[in-house]
Image (cartoon, rainbow, N blue to C red):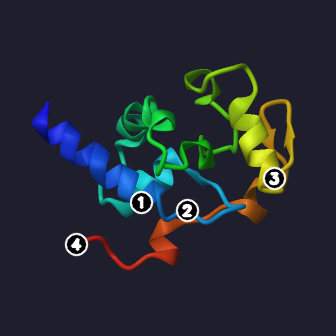
Amino acid sequence: MKDSQGFFERVYEVVRKVPYGRVTSYGAIARYLGTGRSARMVGWAMNNAHALEDVPAHRVLNRNGVLTGKHHFPGSRLMEQLLESEGIRIRDDQVVEFKRHFWDPSVELPPPG
């Protein structure tokens, strides 16, 4: 359990750096952290991250830009509303023009270390 807690904190450190008006994916975070096959673990880390005020969990989506984590937010539309408040359009639980809004930590951040 201790190892997963350390991994979760590393995930949160990356998510804290996702800029306003941008989104990333579970897989992109996993690849950045050098654990490319652990997108599901990133998802587990994000399950309760919406409760951490300094972690913009609403900016983390699946690889297709779908709001798969929306059921972890209070209310039925909070994740969508938070993204829309940042200028990101959502249609049918998916980010419109996902590639335009996508932020890749492997490109934007220095290597973890």
Query: Which label's residue is closer to the chain start, 4 or 2?
Result: 2
81 and 30: which is toward the camera: 81
Question: Which type of secondary structure does the marked residue at label 1 adopt?
Answer: helix
Q: Of circles 4 and 2, which is in front?
A: 2
* Cβ–Cβ under 8 Å for marks 3 and 2: no
Q: Earlier in the sequence, mark 3 or mark 1?
A: 1
Which numbered disc flags the more N-terminal residue, 1 or 4? 1
User: Are there few (<14), some (14-19), or many (20+) residues within 10 Å of tag 1?
Assistant: some
From the viewer's perspective, tell me whether residue 99 is left or right of residue 39. Answer: right
> How busy is the neighbourhood of tag 3: few (under 14 within 10 Å), some, or many (20 plus)?
some
Residue 5 sits in which quadrant?
top left
As helix, strand or loop, the secondary structure at mark 3 comes to loop
Give the residue pinned by disc 2.
Answer: 18
Marker disc for residue 88: 3
Residue type at tag 3: Ile
Nearest to the observer: residue 19 or residue 68: 19
| Left or right side of 94 for 38 | left
Confirm or deny contact between disc 4 and disc 3 (CB under 8 A): no
Kind of residue at badge 1 = Val
Looking at the image, do the residues carrying marks 2 and 1 touch, with CB atoms under 8 Å apart? yes
Per the rendering, the mark at residue 67 is none
106 vs 89, left or right, is left
Q: Nearer the viewer, residue 66 or 72?
A: 72
Mark 4 surroundings within 10 Å by alpha-carbon count, few (fewer than 14), some (14 through 19), many (20 or more): few
Label number found at residue 113: 4
Q: Locate residue 79, reporting x and y percent.
A: 68, 35
Closer to the camera in the image, 100 or 74: 74
Numbered badge on residue 14 = 1
> Does label 3 or label 2 sit earlier along the sequence?
2
**Are discs 4 and 2 less than 8 Å apart at CB?**
no
Helix, strand or loop for disc 2: loop
* Residue farthest to the bottom, as pictured: 110
